[in-house]
Amino acid sequence: MSSIEPRGGRPLSRRAKEQRAYRLVLVGGGSAAVAVVGFVLAVIGVIGFTLPVLAVLVAVACLLLFRRTVSR
């Protein structure tokens, strides 16, 4: 079982924060695009709503992580 104490490592460098933010934007933007296209296809009846909903969840998670990374 892990300890509830905070980790004692060094904070992320500026470069590491930039890289993390960039990756989050790429993944979040891609999943948002998949969500939009998926919702259109789901409304038309080509696919179900599972994939677009999962893509929205990934996009929201990336947005929250991006905001946390940038605000530090």
Image (cartoon, rainbow, N blue to C red):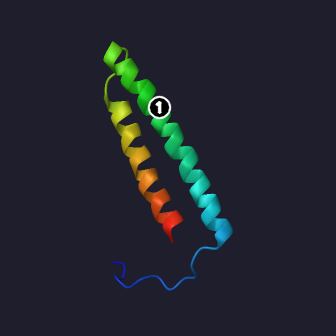
> For residue 20, which quarter of the picture?
bottom right
Task: Residue under label 1, please give it.
Answer: 34
Q: Could you tell me residue 47's position as x and y percent? A: 36, 20
Q: Residues within 10 Å of mark 1 (few under 14, many from 20)?
A: some
Type of amino acid under label 1: Val
Residue ID at (47%, 31%): 34
Q: Could you tell me residue 28's position as x and y percent? A: 50, 45
Q: Nearer the viewer, residue 6 or 71?
A: 71
Whether 22 is drawn above or below 12: the answer is above
Q: Could you tell me residue 31's position as x and y percent? A: 48, 38
Whether 62 is drawn above or below 5: the answer is above
Residue ID at (58%, 45%): 26
Q: Which of 9 and 36 is in front in this view?
A: 36
* Residue placed furthest toward the right: 15
* Residue placed furthest toward the front: 71
Query: In the image, 23: left or right of 48?
Result: right
